[in-house]
Each structure stands twice: as structure tokens, then as C-alpha cells.
Image: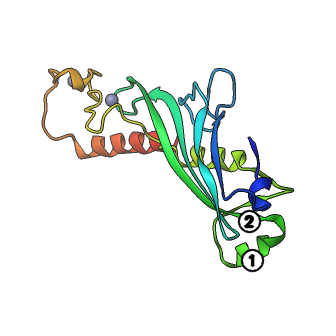
Amino acid sequence: MVLNISSLLAGEKNRLDIDYMLSVASDELGNAVNLAGVRFPTPARVLGQITDNAGYMRLTLSVTLPYSTVCARCARDVEGDFEISFERTVVPEGMVEDAEEKEEDFVVVKNGMLDIDEQLVEVLLLDFPTRVLCKEDCKGLCQKCGKDLNEGPCDCPTGEINPAFAKLLQMFDDEEKNK
Ligand SMILES: [Zn+2]
Ligand SMILES: [Zn+2]
């Protein structure tokens, strides 16, 4: 959404509340761009404000993005809310160089309008975890028989995995991470 912040710039207000929905999915089914197997069935809620403190404007947002995917270990369906906070200094177009010198994170106002959606989507997709688990201590599937070990142990012989085999498993695991 393009935010009109001219009332802040004119000094008529010193705070502007923000509350809107931002679509992050790349198609109607909710599929995510560049994130295989992850769907965003509903838009993200963007909530926060811009405050003006004697000309120093600060944007503070919290973004909640519902997702649905499968557990990286046991392949069960997982749904949840991914949350980020997003804070930036709001800089009028003519003052970008100053902001760059200070190396601050900033967003630029053009003609009284502020458009942050592209940046928000970028941050959300970049920060989204590459592996989602159904629960932190998910036991995953048995590498031999494929049983879901969350439902109890299988009958496969336990004991040390052959080191060469362990290395192979690690490789599969890394591959999974790089997907
Ligand atoms: Zn799991
Ligand atoms: Zn087994």
C-alpha cells in the first residue's frame, strides 16, 4: 500500500497509524516465490506507526504472515504465523545522501508518499526459515523403514549408524537445506 504521509510532513500530526494487509504470495493458490513447498494462503497483516519527533521520522512495524508448509523432518503439514519487526528511518527524497552517509536503514518518501511493500516482501521472503519443523524436537522418520518416530519407535535395529552412511545422510540433509 502507498502511504500518504503528507500530514506528518506538514506537521499537522506527529503520528500516523498503519494497519493493512499485504499479499506476499505469487499466485492465487498462495504459493511463495523462491520458497519451495511453502504457501501463504492469506495476506500478511502489517501493523505499526510512523512517528515524527521534531523532524526525525521513524517507521516501526510488526508484520504477521500466516504460512502453511510441511515439516522438514517428518513431512507432516505445519501451519503457523511468521512474524518480523521492521524499523526504518523515514527520509524525504532530497535528504537521501545524508542518510546514506550515516549508513542508517531508511525508506524514502517521494512526493509525500511512502511505498514500503516491495521491501517488506523482500525481508519476509529472505528471513523466512529454510526449514520448518512441526515441533522443535520432531523425531522425524526412520531412515530405514520410514516410520514416523513421533508415533513411537520402530523395529529397526538401533545402535551406531555406519559412519559412511551417516555422512550420506548428512549430505541429504544439507541438500534439503539448500533447496
Ligand atoms: Zn515433524
Ligand atoms: Zn525403522
Looking at the image, which is closer to me, 145 or 49?
49
Question: Looking at the picture, how far across and down is residue 97, in whole percent?
Answer: 78, 75
**Quadrant in which the N terminus appears:** top right
Quarter of the image where one finds residue 88: bottom right
Quadrant of the image where one finds ligand 2 = top left
Above or below, 21 relative to 130:
above
Q: Residue furthest right?
A: 111
Look at label 1 and name its amino acid.
Asp
Q: Residues within 10 Å of mark 2 (few under 14, many from 20)?
A: many
Q: Residues within 10 Å of mark 1 (few under 14, many from 20)?
A: few
Q: Could you tell me which residue is drawn at 34 percent across and 27 percent down?
A: 74
Q: Position of residue 148 (x, y in %)?
A: 27, 22
In the image, residue 61 sits, relative to residue 160, either above or below, namely: below
Closer to the camera in the image, 157 or 41: 41
For disc 2, the marked residue is 91
Q: Is residue 175 visible?
A: no
On the image, the x and y values in percent for residue 18 come to 64, 44
User: What is the number of the mark on residue 98?
Assistant: 1
* Element type at mark 2: strand
Single out the residue that lies furthest toward the front: 12
Q: CA distance from mark 2 to mark 1?
A: 9 Å
Residue plotted at (17% across, 22% down) = 152
Q: What's the residue type where badge 2 is placed?
A: Val
Q: Are marks 2 and 1 in contact (CB under 8 Å)?
A: yes
Residue found at x 71% / y 79%: 101
